[in-house]
Image: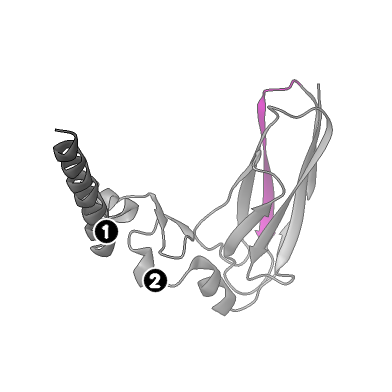
Amino acid sequence: MDKNFKYVMLTILTLCVFTLTIIELTGVSRNAMFRKFHTGGEGVFYSRDGEIYRGEIFPEQTRSRSQIVAEMNKTTVQFYETKYNFGSVSAGRVVSHTFKFKNTGQNPLMIAKTDVTCGCTTPNFPLESIAPGSDGEITIAYNTDGHQGHEEKVIAIHSNALPETVNISVEADVR
């Protein structure tokens, strides 16, 4: 009986590995499952090299957002403010601030990506391009949970503007 049990378990394990291999090779992954059960619409998708796409249904068939922005004509951007102080904030709260900016150039402005110094900071930026002379907004949410004392978080914004990277920051005294 012990020998039969080993054969059954080995067979089940082999079938599991075979099934997972078939699923990966046929492309039935996070993206494919989403597409199968959700017809169209927005979502977060992952390319084969791990890059995250937002709102693109078939990212493997498109160029990455950073590549598109790099090929766009250059423009200029002016932030109305680049630093915001939340003041004294209780630990555990999530606070947010919206930074407004203007496309001061002659070409459309598109944000490629943002880099943050900490996972506690979440930027939300427009995915569409901003027309020349128009305003746009970037909302920064800062989760104070696990932080104490004076905190400053820097967000690097990459776009087709000159300079290509602009830093904005939020700070708070977390108590």
Can residue 167 be seen from the camera position used here? yes
Mark 2: amino acid:
Thr
| Image location of residue 143, percent across then percent down | 66, 32
Q: Horizontally, is 164 left or right of 84 in the view?
A: left
Q: Write the residue at 66% across / 73% down.
A: 75
The residue segment tinted magenta is 90-102
Magenta-span inclusion, residue 96: yes
Identify residue for label 2.
62
Q: How is the image coloured?
A: one colour
| Image location of residue 98, percent across then percent down | 66, 42
Q: Write the residue at 19% across / 34% down.
A: 2
- For label 1, the SS is helix
Q: Quadrant of residue 133?
A: bottom right
| Image location of residue 132, percent across then percent down | 60, 67
Count of number-bearing discs: 2
Relative to 70, does residue 111 appear above or below in the rendering? above
Q: Nearer the viewer, residue 14 or 142?
A: 14
Nearer the camera: disc 1 or disc 2: 1
Q: Nearer the viewer, residue 124 or 136?
A: 124
Q: Horizontally, is 42 left or right of 67 in the view?
A: left
Q: Quadrant of residue 25?
A: bottom left
Q: Which corner quadrant holds the N terminus?
A: top left
The Cα–Cα distance between marks 1 and 2, rounded to whole angstroms, is: 26 Å
Relative to 87, does residue 8 appear above or below in the rendering? below
Q: Write the residue at 38% across / 49% down.
A: 43
Mark 1: amino acid:
Thr
Residue that sits furthest to the right in the current view: 150
